Image (cartoon, rainbow, N blue to C red):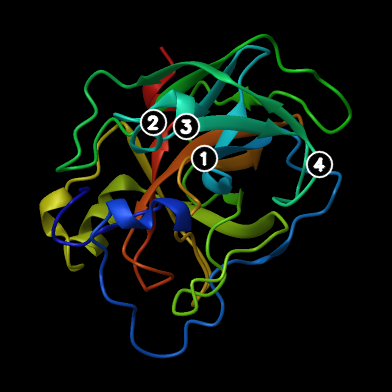
Amino acid sequence: MFLHFGILLLLSQGLLSEVHVSEPIDGDSRIIGGKDATPDMAHYQVSIRGHQGNQEWHSCGVFILNEEYVLTAAHCVFKKNMKDMSIVAGSHTIDKGGDRYKIKKLVPHEKYTKPVVKNDIGIVQIEGKIKYSDKVQPIKLLKEMAPIGKKCLFTGWGYVHLRRKTLPNNLQMLEYETISNDDCTKQLKKSPYPKLMPIDAGQICANRPNEKGACYGDSGGPLVIQDDENNTVQIGVVSWVVPCARKYPDVFASVHGYYD
């Protein structure tokens, strides 16, 4: 469905049947995620759940904009049936806890294009209002361009082991560092997917430690930094990677690029 030549759009195990993915990478990919996120962090992080019969699974990462809207990647909501989805907020674990919300509207960017994965950002409107608490809070968005060489934090429930298709129960966190779009373009031109270049103003790239990085289930998740006032602010939305935890940068939709 997405990108027939096999690029990894970071969908969850429950949606893998919809995606023709690349073969697992050679070598030992035992570390994809980082470590368990601490309970006092990432209160803006929520989970999109997919449903089929009595089965439920984590689909994509999402983060809270305000009481009615959450932000994610466009490919997480593009041509999806909102009746088969819900939002769970307020829990770091997939198997229990949190508050569940039905979805009122799915709004992928009107110019989202699958073949080149541009404008990969979307809004989800929930029914009712999200209940704020010490575990559920919105996040501020970065209004200006993200600084290059800035340490940043990524959180998600994506694969922690690609070959075994192992998904974590606990929210994972991993440190990244932003790089310039020009540098990112140069590196990714040497990847299996040069047709997706160049990286444009609606995208941002970041490097991560070797053998660690975003994978299936991490789509739509937040990349954040600490601003000059020590506030956590959102700079990116997980879009796509060369699968998985390989030597190339990971690609995010830029919050600044779509702020207006």
Q: Closer to the camera, 119 or 178?
A: 119
Task: List the residue tagged with mark 2.
Answer: 77
Q: Which of the two discs, 4 and 3, sits closer to the camera?
A: 3
Circles 2 and 3, Cβ within 8 Å, touching? The answer is no
Gap between marks 4 and 1, in whole Å? Answer: 17 Å
Circle nearer the N terminus (4, 1): 1
Q: Which of the two discs, 1 and 2, sits closer to the camera?
A: 1
Q: Secondary structure at mark 1?
A: strand
Task: List the residue tagged with mark 3.
Answer: 84
Mark 2 neighbour density, 10 Å: few (under 14) some (14–19) many (20 or more): many
At x 53% / y 65%, what residue is drawn?
159
Residue 199 at x, y = what percent? 24, 44
Query: Could you tell me the amino acid type at mark 1?
Result: His
Circles 3 and 1, Cβ within 8 Å, touching? The answer is yes
Gap between marks 4 and 2, in whole Å? Answer: 24 Å
Circles 4 and 3, Cβ within 8 Å, touching? The answer is no
At x 49% / y 71%, what residue is drawn?
165
Task: List the residue tagged with mark 4.
Answer: 97
Q: Residue farthest to the front?
A: 53
Residue 206 at x, y = what percent? 44, 54
Query: Could you tell me the amino acid type at mark 4?
Result: Gly
Gap between marks 4 and 3, in whole Å? Answer: 20 Å
Gap between marks 1 and 2, in whole Å? Answer: 14 Å
Q: Residue farthest to the bottom?
A: 27
Circle nearer the N terminus (1, 2): 1
At x 68% / y 13%, what residue is drawn?
67
Residue 139 at x, y = what percent? 67, 26
Q: Secondary structure at mark 3?
A: helix
Task: List the residue tagged with mark 1.
Answer: 51
